[in-house]
Image (tube, grey):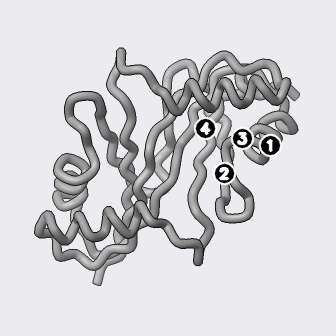
Amino acid sequence: MKENKFLIEVCNKEGVPDIFGMDALKNIRETGLVGIEDIATADLYRFEGDISLEDIRKIAEDVLLDRVIQRYFIREEGTPVRKDGYSIVVDVFYKKGVTDAVADTVSIAIRDAGIKADVKTSTGKRYYIKGRLTKHNIELICEKVLANRLVQDYSIRLLNEEGYNG
């Protein structure tokens, strides 16, 4: 059995408002933190197991995607992430052992779509942040707004040094 790891990122198409990003930006500004210009979000779906790229594409297109307003990207686990103009990426996933109801539903939908692969599914949210922030402020944003530390873990990546101010 070959263990493959894929990440599907589903986000809104250009011109479709990112309600989750706007809400996150509003909540961050309400904390009094400054330096953020914009936030874009994407839903993340992580798949681990004996599954082909062809099946991953089928899952993205037939199970996860709303073709009218969304687009998707498939990445192998560990592939660098890039989004023009955004300098910080925060990924938020449920901790191991915490029930991920969306992942459970996706797993059922995968079987209903006729995909028989034995695959472990987890879901998360990606936040692309545009602005200049200190490392401390990035951590505060994650702790206060983006993640519930009781049930979620987060990771921070700087896409370039422009987003880091200190």
Image quadrant in which you'd find residue 35: top right
Task: Identify the residue position indicated by label 3 in the image.
Answer: 145
Q: Secondary structure at mark 4?
A: strand
Q: Amino acid at mark 1?
A: Glu
Q: Quadrant of residue 135?
A: top right
Q: Secondary structure at mark 1?
A: helix
Distance Cα–Cα, label 1 vs label 4: 12 Å
Callout 2 touching callout 1 (CB < 8 Å): no
Q: Earlier in the sequence, mark 3 or mark 2?
A: 3
Q: Residues within 10 Å of mark 4 (few under 14, many from 20)?
A: many
Q: CA distance from mark 3 to mark 2?
A: 14 Å
Q: Amino acid at mark 4?
A: Val
Q: Earlier in the sequence, mark 1 or mark 4?
A: 4
Q: Quadrant of the C terminus?
A: top right
Query: Where does residue 6 sit, x and y in percent of width and height?
Result: 37, 59
Numbered label attached to residue 89: 4
Secondary element type, mark 2: strand
Q: Identify which residue, 98 or 36, lies in the foreground.
A: 98
**60 to 70, vertically: above or below:** below
Ranked by sequence position, the earlier of labels 4 and 2 is 4
Residue occupying the point 44% across, 50% down = 44
